[in-house]
Amino acid sequence: MRVVKAYPPNIEEIDAAFQVRGKPILFAFGEIIYNPMGVDIAPELMAHEAVHGRRQIAGEGILAAFGQYDFLRQALKTNPTEALKRRAIEDWWHRYINEPAFRLEEEIFAHIAEYAELCRLHGQRWTSRRAMRRTYAAHVARRLAAPLYGNLISQARAKEILLDASACTEEARLYRGGPPCPPVRVGAG
């Protein structure tokens, strides 16, 4: 992914919902990571943002969910690749901002990749894989349960999901593009 030191094109909509302007936040927008504050991006955060970018471009059923069939027909006639990508990214962001359940699901996917990258990069430093997994899961779970995403999940549930995902190696498949594990239940149990 390419990193650009600027705000994403939809910053007004994002900032209205999350009040992020002026904070060291990264924004995936398709194949670009917007980094307006120019912060150093750790490899695990690159993995996190890459998941968002790939899922935005893939559409993940968003275009059909919004019933934009007329737009699709027109886009296919004019510039299918860029027009469809742009619409898929914009639709993803619209749902991300307006639908907390969708936001949580997307953040779970991205945080699983972040967790996997931490384990991959630093696993050789640990004598106990179990201790490593639990330490990194707790660290990433704190981020997933943070106010930035709307306090949509408890830290304990986030950690449980991360550890469950690592048991089926979902994280490695997700950010490398392989087939997914069975869906993760995000409810309280």
Image (spheres, rainbow, N blue to C red):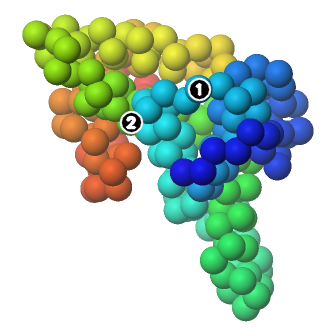
Residue 14 in sight: yes
Give the amino acid at mark 2: Ala
Position of the C terminus by quadrant: top left
Image quadrant assignment for residue 97: top right
Which is closer to the viewer, label 1 or label 2? 1
Percent x, y of residue 46? 49, 37
In this picture, residue 59 sits left or right of residue 186:
right
User: Label 2 near label 1: C-beta < 8 Å?
Assistant: no
Q: Residue at x 74, y 39 (%)?
A: 5
Q: Using a 10 Å C-alpha cutoff, classify the residue at mark 2 as few (fewer than 14 neighbours), some (14 to 19) or many (20 or more).
A: many
Q: CA distance from mark 1 to mark 2?
A: 18 Å
Give the amino acid at mark 1: Asp
Q: Residue at x 60, y 36 (%)?
A: 103
Percent x, y of residue 48? 48, 36
SS category of the residue bearing label 2? helix
Which residue is label 1 attached to?
Answer: 40
Q: Which mark is residue 113?
A: 2
SS category of the residue bearing label 1? loop
Image quadrant assignment for residue 162: top left
Q: Residue at x 51, y 20 (%)?
A: 144
> Mark 1 or 2 closer to N-term?
1
Q: Nearer the viewer, residue 186 or 178?
A: 178
